[in-house]
Amino acid sequence: MGKIEKVSSYLWRKYADYLWTKSERFLLWNMVEPYARPKSFTPVVTIYVAAFYTGVIGAAITEQLYKEKYWEDHPGEVVPLMKPKFYPGPWKVAMGEVPAHHKEEPHKT
């Protein structure tokens, strides 16, 4: 038997051992899995809470920077509401004031 045949038979033997142990592991874990503890939701909840508060803090910082920039250009004026960046829908507030067709008319007596 030459050196190449020895190497190939060694590799085939290792591959057969690998498949055998793989099937043994598969059978073992299929028997144990129903009795395993359920996975915890703690990491997922922690990530969601951290993401939420990161967004809240980011929005507060963005709004504060918007106000400061507005005050630099218009000192002493009331800052209009900032339009949402990621909301393309209808925006009923124009320059911080409700449009005329949404205002209640004063009652004339």
Image (cartoon, rainbow, N blue to C red):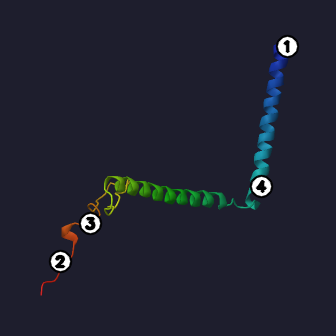
In the rendered image, which residue does mark 3 sit on? 97
Task: Give the residue type that dot 4 points to.
Answer: Met
Q: Residue at x 78, y 30 (%)?
A: 15
User: Is label 4 in a helix, a strand or a loop?
Assistant: helix
Tell me which residue sits at (81%, 40%) in the image. 21
Circle 1 residue: 3
- In primary-sequence order, the first of circles 2 and 4 is 4
Of the image marks 3 and 4, the number of the one nearer the N terminus: 4
Q: CA distance from mark 3 to mark 4?
A: 67 Å
**Marks 3/1: CA–CA distance:** 88 Å
Q: In screen coordinates, is 2 left or right of 103?
A: right
Q: Which residue is mark 4?
A: 31
Separation of residues labelled 1 and 4 (CA atoms)? 42 Å
Residue receiving disc 2: 105
* Kind of residue at badge 3: Glu
Q: Amino acid at mark 2?
A: Glu
Quadrant position of the C terminus in the picture: bottom left
